[in-house]
């Protein structure tokens, strides 16, 4: 199985801060990586697919980069609505796997 | 607009079989090249992929659950079903159904349904 490791597991930042979350795959997954946002009590929402493509309707402050085994999700200016847990997800190989999540808190 | 709605018993006894349905509206399950999948999330924990079925019939399961899982599509009812046998406390989770296009990511999700395993 491909292991997905996210860091940090929790981060606290102020409104307006630039926030970066890292995801590492245990083997090459090319660009078959997605990022999801999960607000408490809600289903995950797709933000980024193919590592760097913004899903329709997602604010442009979200961006993704990387390929192979190293990926990042960046929020350019943190907003109160961004309080959530973020997951990376690889669909390069079965079984599909998710990272452990990064909980973003607002200071 | 596509909508997915999970339903099923909220309480299942240990050793029994968990059965859930994902009703699809706003689109046909049999149209287009999509995978229909199930993902679960134990309370307070992360996401675990259970398995998926391609619209044409191929199924893919998480090896950790493979011996207990069955996913199937009923095109006449426009729904996707999940069966998980011999459940234990560890199967207590919110269960989501979701759709992803061939070579794509899960872009459409149901709201999820909580299933508790308890006697």
Image: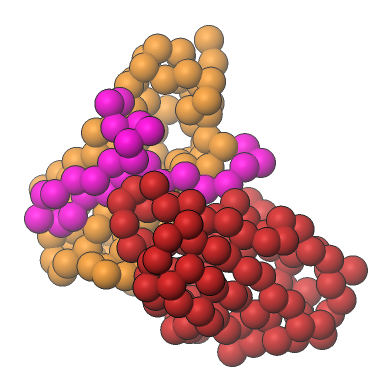
Does the rendering let one see residue B17?
yes
- Which image quadrant for residue B26? bottom left
Q: Colour of chain B?
A: orange
Q: How is the image coloured?
A: by chain
Along the viewing direction, whichever of A62 and B111 lies nearer the viewer:
A62
Outermost residue to the right = A107
When the figure is inspected, residue A59 is found, relative to residue A44, above or below; the finding is below
Along the viewing direction, whichever of A105 and A11 lies nearer the viewer:
A11
Where does the image place residue B4, in percent across and percent down from the top left? 36, 55
When the figure is inspected, residue A27 is found, relative to residue B37, above or below; the finding is below
**Quarter of the image containing the C terminus of chain A?**
bottom right
When the figure is inspected, residue A62 is found, relative to residue B104, above or below; the finding is below
Where does the image place residue A37, in percent across and percent down from the top left? 58, 65
For residue A98, side relative to residue B18 (left or right): right
Q: Colour of chain A?
A: red
Does the rendering let one see residue B2?
no
Determine the residue positioned at 55% across, 63% down. Answer: A24
- Which image quadrant for residue A18? bottom right
When the figure is inspected, residue A49 is found, relative to residue A5, above or below; the finding is below
For the record, the magenta segment spans: B43-68
| Residue B53 is covered by the magenta coloring | yes
């Amino acid at each position: 199985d491909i292991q997905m490791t996210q860091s940090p597991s929790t981060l606290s930042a102020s409104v307006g801060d630039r926030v970066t979350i890292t995801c590492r795959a245990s083997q090459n997954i090319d660009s078959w990586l997605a990022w999801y946002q999960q607000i408490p009590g809600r289903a995950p929402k797709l933000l980024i697919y193919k590592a760097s493509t913004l899903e329709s309707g997602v604010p442009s402050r979200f961006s993704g980069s990387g390929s192979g085994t190293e990926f990042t999700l960046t929020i350019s200016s943190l907003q109160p609505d961004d309080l959530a847990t973020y997951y990376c997800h690889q669909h390069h190989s079965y079984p599909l796997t998710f990272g452990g999540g990064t909980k973003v808190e607002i200071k | 607009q596509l909508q997915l709605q999970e339903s099923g018993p909220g309480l299942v006894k240990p050793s029994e079989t968990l059965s859930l349905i994902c009703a699809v509206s706003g689109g046909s399950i049999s149209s287009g090249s999509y995978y229909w999948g199930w993902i679960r999330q134990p309370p307070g924990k992360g996401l675990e992929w259970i398995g998926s079925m391609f619209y044409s019939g191929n199924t893919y399961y998480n090896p950790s659950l493979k011996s207990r899982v069955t996913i199937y599509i009923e095109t006449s009812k426009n729904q996707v079903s999940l069966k998980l046998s011999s459940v234990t406390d560890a199967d207590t989770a919110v269960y989501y159904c979701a759709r992803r296009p061939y070579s794509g990511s899960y872009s459409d999700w149901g709201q999820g349904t909580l299933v508790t395993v308890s006697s």
